Image (cartoon, rainbow, N blue to C red):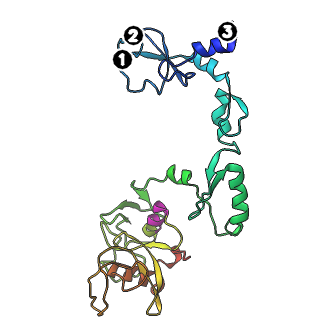
Amino acid sequence: MASMASVDDFHLTCGICLEIVEDAIETCCCHQLFCELCVKGVSTCPICRENLRTTVSHVIRRMVGNIEKPCDHCKIMFQRANLKSHLEICIKKPTSCTLDGCNFSGTKETTLNHLITAHAKELTSPNYKIVSRQNLNESSVDMICRKTNSFGRDARLGETGKYYCQGQLDTGCRCCDRFCGPTNGCNCTACFSLDLSSRKLPKGYSINKLGHPVRKGEYWLGQRRFYCGRKVMPFCTEDGFQTDGWCGDDDGDNCDSCKIIQTQLEISGCYSALYLEN
């Protein structure tokens, strides 16, 4: 005689994958159960070949939710309805180190031990902030919408991808018309701050007047210059330097836009309060 468990399993089986139904739906034509994912995009009933119309089977979903199933990682038994929340905290679930440049992977338990032993310095540094890949992917920052800068002005993206409010520059800049935008050129410190916050650039990076991320390279002719890494350089500059065509990425002469941001950050100091060097 069949056990009650096996009879229940039989009646709760998906007609396609032949496993216990996940997110059960029932057909209106022949009342067969399927997993919602299994019939996604299907137009004809796999059993009776009628046009497929379905309804959520709430009763079956509750029944399935009460069936116990072992966690794939720790093998502890849980009701199916509780498995999803358990997986968020399961110490045996595979995970990886979220710190930049680290390729360690293991269970949640071993990853926590790894963070303590291998990254104690970073974790205890007052200037270090851990940002998970998941949080970056789920960021709520809208990178293209109109914003209000700290001066209270409406700021919108120009053709460079930088924010501009059309107000007068507060930077003492001499390389453009001394107004913030409206479509290109240098921007005021309030809009420059919007550029940095919306792009979430790592520490040590800035943005030049053409809207490209820049960072410092190695020492060259006694100075660490800013580079954008783009192929915009002539093969022989006006100063007589030979280049390979790229601005950087670690040494050599830099492009005009990177020269300007270098001056703004380190000489005139107009954006220096917004720049955090590594």
Q: Quadrant of residue 132?
A: bottom right
Location of residue 239 with respect to 65 vertically, above or below: below
Q: Residue at x 69, y 43 (%)?
A: 89
In the foreground, 80 or 11: 11
- Report the span colored magenta: 193-200
Residues at badges 2 and 3 in contact (C-beta under 8 Å)? no
Location of residue 152 with respect to 61 vertically, above or below: below
Q: Residue at x 38, y 74 (%)?
A: 229
- Amino acid tagged 1: Thr
Q: Position of residue 168 (x, y in %)?
A: 37, 73
- Amino acid tagged 3: Ala
Q: CA distance from mark 1 to mark 2?
A: 8 Å
Front disc: 2 or 3: 3
Looking at the image, which residue sits at the far front? 1
Location of residue 170 with respect to 37 vertically, above or below: below
- Find numbered disc 3 in the image and state the secondary structure of the residue it sits on: loop
Q: CA distance from mark 1 to mark 3?
A: 33 Å
Q: Position of residue 142 (x, y in %)?
A: 44, 53
* 201 sits left or right of 71 in the view: left
Say which residue label 2 marks.
48
Specify the label residue 62 is tagged with.
Answer: none
Say which residue label 3 marks.
2
Classed neighbour count for the residue bearing mark 1: other residues with Cα under 10 Å, few (<14), some (14–19), many (≥20): few
- Amino acid tagged 2: Cys
Q: Quadrant of residue 166?
A: bottom left
Classed neighbour count for the residue bearing mark 2: other residues with Cα under 10 Å, few (<14), some (14–19), many (≥20): few
Say which residue label 1 marks.
44
| Residue 102 in magenta stretch | no
